[in-house]
Amino acid sequence: MTLTLIEVKVFTLDAMKDIFDIDYLTHIENFITEERQKRFLDVLKSRTKHFTVAIEDVFQLHNTSAVMRTCEVFGVQELNVIEEKYGADIDKEIAMGAQKWVDVNKFGSTSACIKGLRDKGYKIIATSPHNESCFIDEFDITEPAALFFGTEKSGLSEEVLNQADGFIKIPMRGFTESLNISNSAAIILQDITNKLHKSDIEWGLTDKEIVQKRIDWTRKSIKDIDFITQKYFEK
């Protein structure tokens, strides 16, 4: 199959995440070290889509980046960002490379995000000190859940609160009634992912998803990947 350079660029940038090609993976892995290949496999063993995170119109850029970093640290593969009011570009210094390893899904509205996650089978869980909230240690980890975090000042919107299937909150022992969003995400994700890893739930990525992420991460590790891909598909 012969592709023009323009066709290759469209193919590699827009559609590569949907490619399930073991031969292509084997080919591009020749351009990274065996140690890096092994590192990818080791990390992917702990990756999950059983839980995902959604952040709603977070104004402060560093908090979006910090939540992404938290997702990466605790093995949550996908972060959903609602950009109804504010943009959500990533602060690379705070994310510290997490933007390379975590998949970010962007939505133009809260309703679109909720629908998209429900269509994937997620329960919508609002993180809020709501009276109906359960504490972290009471949270049911058995079902796939999308954890929604709100803005620094006003919390989650009424739309999320009204449509939520459940609520979760962090126990507070002092006078302060809330935490910064990045701190809240870190505390909750550390707790529930730790329980998940100790459970009998099938929380890992599928074989196909693992291959796709190996392709994605390997591509991001190679400087001349577009040229290498073009030569591969010209064979």
Image (cartoon, rainbow, N blue to C red):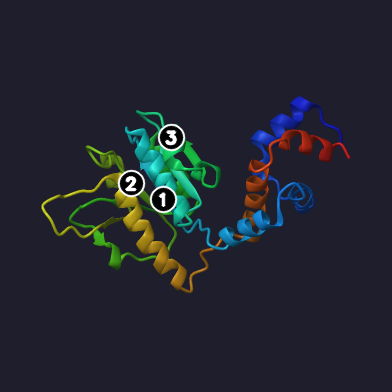
Compared to residue 89, the image places residue 47 above or below, namely below
Residue under pointer 3? 91
- Percent from the top left, x then y, of residue 202? 52, 68
Relative to 27, 168 lies left or right:
left
Badge 2 density bin: few <14, some 14–19, many ≥20, Cα 10 Å: some
Residues marked 3 and 2 touching at CB (< 8 Å): no
- Percent from the top left, x then y, of residue 225? 72, 37
* Circle 2: residue type: Ser
Q: Secondary structure at mark 2?
A: helix
Q: Secondary structure at mark 1?
A: helix
- Percent from the top left, x then y, of residue 224? 72, 35
Residue under pointer 1? 70
Residues marked 3 and 1 touching at CB (< 8 Å): no
- Percent from the top left, x then y, of residue 47? 53, 58
Q: What distance separates the C-alpha of mark 3 from that of mark 2?
A: 14 Å
Image quarter in which the N terminus is found: top right
Which residue is at 71% across, 34% downward?
Answer: 11
* Circle 3: residue type: Asp
* Circle 1: residue type: Thr
Which residue is at 70% across, 30% downward?
Answer: 10
- Front tag of 3 and 2: 3
Q: What distance separates the C-alpha of mark 2 from that of mark 1?
A: 8 Å
Residue under pointer 2? 182
Q: What distance separates the C-alpha of mark 3 from that of mark 1?
A: 14 Å
